[in-house]
Image (cartoon, rainbow, N blue to C red):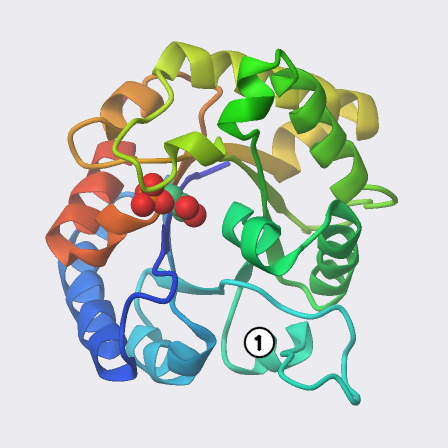
Amino acid sequence: MPSYIVGNWKMQLSDQDSSALAKEVARLWSAQAASRPQVRAVVCPSHLALRAVGEVLRGTNVALGAQDCFWEEKGAFTGEVSPKALKELGCEYCIVGHSERRQYLGETDEMANRKILALLKQGLTPILCVGETREERDAGRRDAVVIGQVRAALKDVALVGTQRLIVAYEPRWAIGTGMPCSPDDAASMHQLINDTLAEMFAPDVAERQIAVVYGGSVDPKNIASYLAVPIIQGALIGGASLKAPDFAAMCEAASEPAK
Ligand code: 13P
């Protein structure tokens, strides 16, 4: 299983800026990536920029991901984008259930579940985001919230053949705040997620086909402290993924011998 370093560009860049950033990321990382197959670099631009960024990344060692999708293949669903359309644009990954979508757009675990099933059907790898709010943590509900999200979003999900899944533990209070969850704290949540996955999937499937990564104020300075924890299998990065040298440096950190 590689270490996944995933950049979530959110709604931060224009079409042109997205292409320029992708070019720079591919240039910086491609020089090293061939000798570092244990790292999988993925960038997730806005839907608007997927085609242009996909063209820039074709033939490079940086994979393309989307930030969201709908669960139907086709039809009268104004404003939505299907996993099939994402696949046609070259996407291999898609974020699902990000906390910003849960907070601002009412995305639920049930919706995330439908999206995951639809993505797997098209051969894309879902990146399921889970994580508690500050209030839930303070009320002692952290574990119950995260276990509940994992169980509901992965209901009836079976990974067959080479299908893969990534679960990102992203505590909401750590996103975009510059106040990351400590590596020890993240490690205990990863263990809890792994235990939940082990109950839901066959042990070899959970181990070989599902990666659990951390997200929330990860940057080039602190990433090594997360990746030093063996059960943290990568990072989902927002703000710090918008600078190509920083993103390349974080990919490099994931290729250190300890991983
Ligand atoms: P930041 O890295 O900016 O905290 O964002 C994390 C995130 O939401 C990635 O999906």
| Horizontal side of residue 65 vs 88, given as left or right | left
Q: Is residue 205 visible?
A: no
Where does the image place residue 173, in percent across and percent down from the top left?
43, 31
**Residue positioned 32% across, 61% down in the render:** 61
Name the residue at 51% across, 36% down.
1
Q: Is residue 246 visible?
A: yes
Residue plotted at (61% across, 50% down): 102
Q: Position of residue 46 (x, y in %)?
A: 41, 71
Amino acid type of the residue tagged 1 in the rendering = Leu
The C terminus: image quadrant: top left
Q: Is residue 232 left or right of residue 224?
A: right
Q: Indicate whether 240 appears above or below 120.
A: above
Considering every residue shown, the one lying at the far right of the view is 156
What residue is shown at x 61% (from left), y 60% (from top)? Answer: 105
| Mark 1: few/some/many CA within 10 Å (<14, 14-19, 20+) | many
Q: Closest to the observer: 60 or 8?
A: 8
Coordinates of residue 209 in the picture (x, y in percent): 64, 39
In the displayed image of the protein, which residue is found farthest to the bottom? 76
Q: Quarter for ligand 1?
A: top left
Residue 182, compared with residue 116, is above or below; it is above
Apparent side of residue 84 relative to residue 52 in the rendered image (left or right):
right
Q: In terms of image quadrants, where is residue 87?
A: bottom right
Q: Which residue is mark 1?
A: 86
Quick check: 87 above or below 128? below
Dot 1: what SS? helix
User: Viewed as shown, does residue 173 lie left or right of 20?
Assistant: right
How many marks can you see? 1
- Measured as percent of width and height from the top left, residue 237 is found at 34, 45
